[in-house]
Amino acid sequence: MDQIIDLTRLDEILAEHASTPGGLLPILHAVQKTWGHVPPATVPAIAARLNLSRAEVHGVITYYHHFRDKPGGKTLIQMCRAEACQARGCDALIAHATKTVGCSLHETNGDGSVTLEPVYCLGHCATGPNIQVGEKLYGRMTPSRFDEIVMQSVRPGLEFA
């Protein structure tokens, strides 16, 4: 089922940022803040207002890891896949995380509590592997620390098998 978009709110967002140089990014941030993602139905209006093609707007949405084109889970867990984190074991951590939360990267688990997203640098390369849960960054991540963080911030009271 398609999401219903409040066109009045979308017009307000476009009016607020359309004349700003580089206004596409502030528009996308505002749209995502409003709806939790950038609904595909908003892309034609954004493109038209900024005199861009729909492909250009879609390209920005898919290029930046911050933007989603479909609703995410209640909690977003970003897992760094940059070279420094790879050298420090992020692939094993990602394998553990997917089992723990019950979904793969770029997916939301069945109960809608978690979305796992890969990112390509969280900016703390010396402390990898790194994850970000919501707005909080965690370094030197291990499978057991991951489990603790998920239990505390995502699923309080949950115990893993």
Image: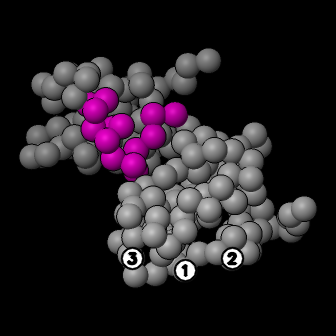
| Pointer 3 or 2: first along the chain | 3
Q: Would residue 73 appear left or right of 127 to someone viewing this image?
A: right
**From what the image shows, is residue 50 above or below residue 73?**
above
Type of residue at label 2? Answer: Arg
The residue located at (50%, 73%) in the rendering is 88
Residue name at image x 33 percent, y 25 percent: 43
Q: Secondary structure at mark 2?
A: helix
From the image, tell me which residue sits under label 2.
Answer: 145
Dot 3, how many residues are within 10 Å of its Cα: few (below 14), some (14-19), or many (20+)?
A: some
Q: What kind of element bears circle 3?
A: loop
The magenta stretch spans which residues?
A: 57-70
**Residue 57 screen position, x and y as percent:** 26, 31
Q: Quadrant of residue 59?
A: top left
> Spatial distance from mark 3 to mark 2, Cα to Cα?
17 Å
Which dot marks residue 124?
3
- Give residue 39's position: percent from left, percent from top: 45, 30
Q: Is residue 65 magenta?
A: yes
Residue 74 visible in the shown view = no
Contact, mark 1 vs mark 2 (Cβ under 8 Å): yes
- Which mark is on residue 69? none
Q: Earlier in the sequence, mark 1 or mark 2?
A: 1
Which amino acid type is shown beneath numbered disc 3?
His
